[in-house]
Image: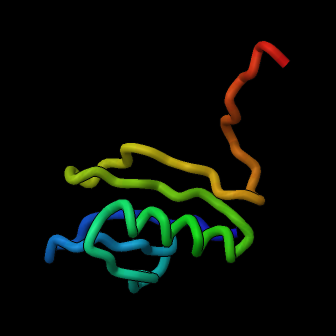
Amino acid sequence: MANYHVSRRADGDWQAKKEGADKAGGIFDTQCEAEKMAKEFSANSGGGEVRIHGLDGKIRDSDTVKPAIDPNPPKDKVY
């Protein structure tokens, strides 16, 4: 399982970086591209969490990538 963070670099590009890594797994022009690749990287590593940081550096969203288990699954009251 591998968790990834999507954040903006000082040069204005976006990076997909594995949690605890020294270097980014990929550098991209847009946040959307970085998020897509971070999810792909995580899925290829057995799933995990992808945390997307806003321009202020704070986490603004977090997605669970399968086959990892979502720690806070939505509560479906119909089924």
Q: Residue at x 72, y 23 (%)?
A: 75
Depth check: 68 or 58 in front? Answer: 68
The number of discs equals 0
Quadrant of the frame with the C terminus: top right
Depth check: 27 or 20 in front? Answer: 27
Position of 58 compared to 79: left or right? left
The vertical placement of 25 against 72, above or below, is below
Q: Residue furthest right?
A: 79
Q: Residue at x 42, y 72 (%)?
A: 16
Residue 47 falls in which quadrant of the image?
bottom right
Q: Residue furthest left?
A: 11
Q: Position of residue 66 (x, y in %)?
A: 72, 57
Residue 1 falls in which quadrant of the image?
bottom right
Position of 68 compared to 31: left or right? right
Q: Residue at x 28, y 50 (%)?
A: 54
The vertical placement of 68 against 25, above or below, is above
Q: Residue furthest top?
A: 78
Position of 61 compared to 39: left or right? left
Q: Position of residue 34 (x, y in %)?
A: 40, 68
Q: Position of residue 44 (x, y in %)?
A: 68, 76
